[in-house]
Image: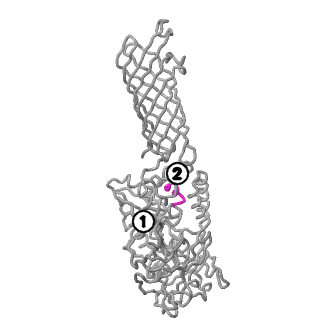
Amino acid sequence: MKVNFRIFCLFLALPGFLFAAEPKEFTALITCSPSEASTAQFADWTALFEKNENDAMAETFRNWKEGWFGSGLLIRVKEAEGENLLIVTNKHVTLNSASMAVQFLPDSEQGRELKESCPVFTDPDLDLALIDIPDAWAEGLPALGLPFSEELHDGEDVYAAGYPGLFGKPVWQLSKGVVSNHSAAIDQIISSEITSLIQHSAAVDPGNSGGPLLKKEGESWLPAGINTWSIRNRNDTYFAIPIHKVSVLVKNYGLYNGAERAAYLKKSLIRRMEALTELLNSSEWPEDFDESFISEAYVLDHGFNAYLSLVNQEAEEQEALFVKGHGPMDILKSSVGWWAWSKWQTQKKEKIFTFDRSVMDKDSLASCLANAKEDSVAKVPLLLEKKEYNAEFILKEGIWLLKSLDFAFPIKDRKIKDAAHKAGSPKKKAKKKRKADVDDISLGVLFDAVPPFLNKDMGDLDLDLPGWGLGITMNFPVKDYFAYNTGIAWRSMKMESSSSYWGSSEKKEASFSGLAGEAGISGGYPFGKGASVFYPFGAASISFAFGSLKGISDEGLTGAVMFRFGGGLKYMNLNKSFLVSLGMFNERGKILSISEELPSLNHVVFRAEVHWLMR
C-alpha cells in the first residue's frame, strides 16, 4: 500500500490538452466485496427471509453479500513532488467494502485491472470518495485535471458515463440527456446548505454511481459532476454532485495525509459530535439524515433488530428513511440511526444532550487523535444534565463513523426468525395502518365457561350446573414472549353437594355472582409463516371478586379469591391485527362466607378471547 504525506496544490487544466480522450478511457469500473463478517451475517438473514417466504427481501440481501460495482472518474492532481492520479467515486460505493478491484477498458486488449488495496478517503458531508491508485500502475491512462470551473446551464446537453448492471454484469454505457436544473436544492437528498445538485435526464442506472457527468466542447470532454442519485417512480430524474466539490475533497485529503492530520481529525470528530447531539435533541427525524454516519460494526451488532422494529412504523416514516437507500447495508444503517433517535425521544422529556469541546484536549482523546489510523476508536462523553454517556466512533476511510451509543442499545432481544416474516421491503408503499407484531399490546373480550361434565368430584363441591364469565382483557408484553395479563369480568357459578360436608345427606346448592378483577402472566413461543402465527402458551393468574352469595343460611355480599393456571393456543393474524385465544385452566379458590364456612373450589374453566393488536 502506498502511504502519502503530501499537500496537494490544485491547478487549472487546459481543456484541449487534457480532455481529448474518450470517456471510456478515463471512466473506471469499481468492483467491491463486503467483509467476511457482514457476508456471514447477511447469509443468515437471507436464510431467515427465505424460511419465512419473504422472497423480495431475501433476494435483496443475497445480492448484496455477493458484492457490487460502481463507476469512477480518473483525475490528475498536481503536487509539489509531481502529479498524482486519483479516482473519484461515490462514498456509498467504497464505504461498506472490504476489498476493491479497479478496471479501465475491461472489455478490450488495452484493459488493465488493479486488485491491490489502495488508500481510500471519503467526504464527511458529501457522497464522494477518493481512491489513491499507484502512479506506476496508472501510467499512460488519460486523466482529467483539476479544478473544473465551467458552469452548466439549464437545457444544456450532458452525458452520463459508467458501468451500470445488465443481467447481473457491468456493461459500459454513455447516455445523453439535458440539464433540467443546474442548481437544484433538494433537502430530502442532501441539505442545500452543503451543496446544490445538478438535475439532469441522462440515464443513470445502478452501477453508474460515482461515474462522471460530462459535457462536450468540440472533441473535448469536460467533467461537470459525479452521478449519485436517481429518483424512483419518476422518469428521467437524476442528480449529480457538482464537480467543483471534488476540489474541496482533494484539499481535505492533503490535510489528512499531512502535518495537520491530528487537527483535521479533531475538527472532524467535533463536527460529528455536534451533529449527533443535534440529532438526539431534535423532536423530528431529519429528512436529510446521512446513513453513512453509522458504522458497519453498529449494523452487525444491532441493524437487523432495528430494522424489524422499524417496519412497524407508519408508511411516511419508512419513506423518509429509505428514499435514498442504495442497498440493504444502507437501509440497516438508517434503521440503527432511527432506532437510537426514537428510543431517546421516548425518554428525554425536557432534557437535552450537550457536548463539551474541551474534552477533545484531554490526554486520552488527544493521544487517540494524534495516533489515529484506520479502525482506531475514539470514545467521547455526552452529558445529560449531570449524567455522562459515551459515544464511540471508529475511523473509516478518513471519516469518523458512529460505533455505539451506550444508552441506546441493546434493542429488546426478540428472536429474529419470529419477526422476519413480516419484515417486507420498505420500498413498497406501506399501509397507513400500523402493522401488528407478536410483541404488541392487545385489547380484547373474554368468555369463560365452566362445564359441569368436567367438574364432578373435583374437590368438596360439584359444579353440576354451568358457570360462565364475560369481560374485557388486555395483554402487555414485557420480555421475549412473556406478557402481563389483566382483565375484568362478570362471573357466575352455581354449586351443589350432597356430601356430609354440609352436615346432612340432603343436596344443597349455593350460587355466587359478581365482578372479578384478574392479573397474571403468560408466556409462549410463536411459530408460523407469513402473516399467520400460532402461539402455544401457558398462563397463571389470581383474581379477586366481589358479589352476591345465595343459597345458604347467611346470604349477602361477600368476596372470593381464585388462582388459575393452564394453557392453550393463540392464533395471530399480523396483517389484520387480531388474535384469537383458546385455553383450558384449573381454577382453585375460596368464596368467603360471613358466618358459614364454604368448601374450597376446584374446577376446570374453558376460556375464549378475541383481541385487537395495538401499540
Residue 264 at x, y percent in the picture: 44, 76
Total tally of numbered discs in the picture? 2
Residue 469 lies, with reference to residue 187, above or below; the image says above
Q: Nearer the viewer, residue 271 or 125?
A: 125
Is residue 258 something that shows in the picture? no
Farthest-out residue, right: 109
Rate crowding at label 1 as few (under 14), some (14 to 19) or many (20 or more) other CA atoms within 10 Å: many
Judging by the rendered image, the residue that carries numbered circle 1 is: 289
What secondary structure do most residues of the magenta stretch adopt?
Answer: helix
Judging by the rendered image, the residue that carries numbered circle 2 is: 422
Three-letter code, disc 1: Phe
Which residue shows up at 33% across the image and 53% down it? 349
Magenta stretch: includes residue 353: no
Q: Which residues are magenta?
A: 298-307
Residue 480 at x, y percent in the picture: 51, 44
Q: Earlier in the sequence, mark 1 or mark 2?
A: 1
Three-letter code, disc 2: Lys
Q: Nearer the viewer, residue 165 or 390?
A: 165
Q: CA distance from mark 1 to mark 2?
A: 25 Å
Which residue shows up at 61% across the image and 58% down it? 43
**If the image is split into quadrants, where does the N terminus sit?**
bottom right
Q: Nearer the viewer, residue 217 or 519?
A: 217
Q: Nearer the viewer, residue 592 or 369?
A: 592
Is residue 161 something that shows in the picture? yes
Number of the front mark, 1 or 2: 2
Magenta stretch: includes residue 306: yes
Residue 433 at x, y percent in the picture: 42, 50
